[in-house]
Image: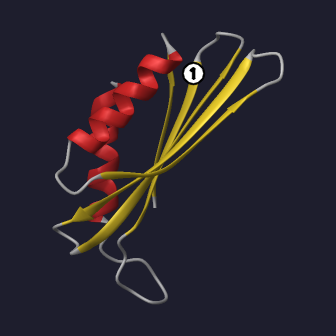
Amino acid sequence: MAKYETQLTGSFDEWLSRIESGIVGGSVSASLEDASDFFSADGRSRCSVRVFERYSMIGENRVSLSVTLFQVDGGPIQCSAIASGGSQAVFFKINTWGEETFLEKFEELVE
C-alpha cells in the first residue's frame, strides 16, 4: 500500500473534476469504480471519496486508488490518496510497482 497526503487550495469542485478526469484520462484501463459525497447540514463541510481502478502491466494485475477530499468552511482541502492491490503473494506483499506508479500519476495531478 502506498499513501500520499497534501493540502489543496482553490475550488473543491474544480479539484474533484481535475482528479476524476486526470485519473480516468491518464490510462487506457483506468476507471472510476464508485463515488460518495457528503455535506454537513449547514453546508460548511464537505467530503468526497472516489475509488479508481486500473490494470498494471508491470504487475500483470489490477490496482486501486482511493481518493478523499475534505473541506471545512471554505478552508484548505485535505487530500488523501491510497493505492492498494496488485500484490501476488499470499502472506506478504511483493510486487508493489503498480500501486506506486498509480500513486505517482495522482501526485502529478495535484502538484
- Coordinates of residue 35 in the picture (x, y in percent): 53, 45
How many numbered marks are there? 1
Q: Tell me the kind of residue under disc 1.
A: Ile
Question: Residue drawn at (72%, 11%), measured in percent from left and top?
Answer: 73
- Coordinates of residue 8 in the picture (x, y in percent): 49, 19
Q: Secondary structure at mark 1?
A: strand
- Coordinates of residue 41 in the picture (x, y in percent): 83, 22
The image quadrant where one finds the C terminus is: top left
Above/below status of 59 relative to 89:
above
Give the residue furthest to the right. Answer: 41
Above/below status of 30 relative to 38:
below
Residue placed most toward the observer, 25 or 107: 25
Give the residue furthest to the bottom. Answer: 90
Is residue 28 rendered to the left or right of residue 16? left
Question: Residue drawn at (37%, 76%), measured in percent from left and top?
Answer: 87
Residue placed most toward the observer, 74 or 40: 40
- The colour scheme used to paint the residues is secondary structure
Label 1: how many Cα within 10 Å (few below 14, some 14–19, many 20+): many
Question: Residue drawn at (21%, 75%), measured in percent from left and top?
Answer: 60
Question: Residue drawn at (22%, 57%), measured in percent from left and top?
Answer: 29
Residue placed most toward the observer, 84 or 93: 84
- Coordinates of residue 108 in the picture (x, y in percent): 27, 32
Above/below status of 15 relative to 63:
above
Q: Quadrant of residue 56?
A: bottom left
Residue placed most toward the observer, 66 or 28: 28
The residue labelled by disc 1 is 77
Is residue 74 rendered to the left or right of residue 87? right
